[in-house]
């Protein structure tokens, strides 16, 4: 799977760990930045990742900031983007299985690297269940 990933300065350390994890899992990763710890504007990186998911260049996206809230707010403004802010495994699985989330948002100051890796593994490997859930997704 091709996955776009982006972060702001609050998520740069976690992003590096997740890029490595995704590559080890056999995924192709397109890193949209940021690439330094200096303060940046998170909407720029959310837009870059969401554009790649929207146009089909990447199948899914991952966005990381301090809390994940800002990234999720920006991401969900894009048509066709279903971004889920996930801080634990059940929500990560359900965001895929029931909501067909195509963008995962994480808060680097909320979840540690170990939990974030588990969340990413669960989110990437969980398939959409379709059925009644597809009808609901079509409603928005």
Image: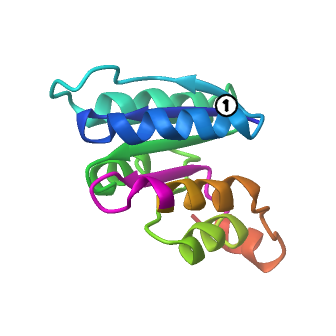
Residues rendered magenta in the picture: 100-114
- The percent position of residue 24, horizontal first and vertical second, equals 71, 36
Quarter assignment of residue 22: top right
- Identified at 62% across, 50% down, the residue is 102
Q: State the scheme by which the image is colored.
A: rainbow
User: What is the count of numbered marks?
Assistant: 1
Left or right: 19, with 138 as reference point:
left
Q: Specify whether residue 84 is in view.
A: no
Quadrant (top left, top right, bottom left, bottom right) of the C terminus: bottom right
Quarter assignment of residue 110: bottom left
Q: Is residue 121 placed above or below 27 in the rendered structure?
A: below
Secondary-structure class at tag 1: loop
Q: Is residue 127 placed above or below 102 in the rendered structure?
A: below
Left or right: 65, with 32 as reference point:
left
Disc 1 residue crowd, few under 14, some 14–19, many 20+, Cα 10 Å: many
- Residue 103 magenta: yes
Query: Residue 56 versus residue 110: which sits nearer the camera?
Result: 110
Quarter assignment of residue 63: top left
- The percent position of residue 59, horizontal first and vertical second, equals 70, 38
- The percent position of residue 8, horizontal first and vertical second, equals 29, 34
Query: Residue 21 versus residue 27: which sits nearer the camera?
Result: 21
Identify the residue position indicated by label 1 in the image.
58
Q: Specify whether residue 58 is in view.
A: yes
- The percent position of residue 36, horizontal first and vertical second, equals 27, 20
- Residue 53 magenta: no
Quadrant (top left, top right, bottom left, bottom right) of the N terminus: top right
- Identified at 49% across, 38% down, the residue is 17
- Identified at 75% across, 62% down, the residue is 126
- Identified at 75% across, 56% down, the residue is 125
């Amino acid at each position: 799977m091709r996955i776009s990933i982006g972060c702001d300065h609050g998520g740069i350390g976690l992003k590096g760990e997740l890029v490595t994890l995704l590559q080890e899992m056999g995924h192709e990763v397109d890193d949209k930045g940021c690439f330094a710890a200096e303060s940046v504007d998170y909407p720029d990186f959310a837009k870059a990742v969401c554009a790649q998911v929207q146009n089909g260049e990447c199948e899914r996206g991952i966005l990381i900031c301090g809390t994940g809230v800002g990234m999720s707010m920006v991401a969900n403004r894009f048509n066709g983007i279903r971004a889920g802010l996930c801080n634990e495994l059940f929500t990560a699985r359900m965001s895929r299985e029931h909501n067909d989330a195509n963008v995962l948002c994480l808060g680097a100051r909320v979840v540690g690297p170990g939990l974030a890796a588990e969340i990413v593994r669960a989110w990437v490997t969980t398939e959409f269940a379709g059925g009644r859930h597809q009808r609901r997704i079509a409603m928005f």
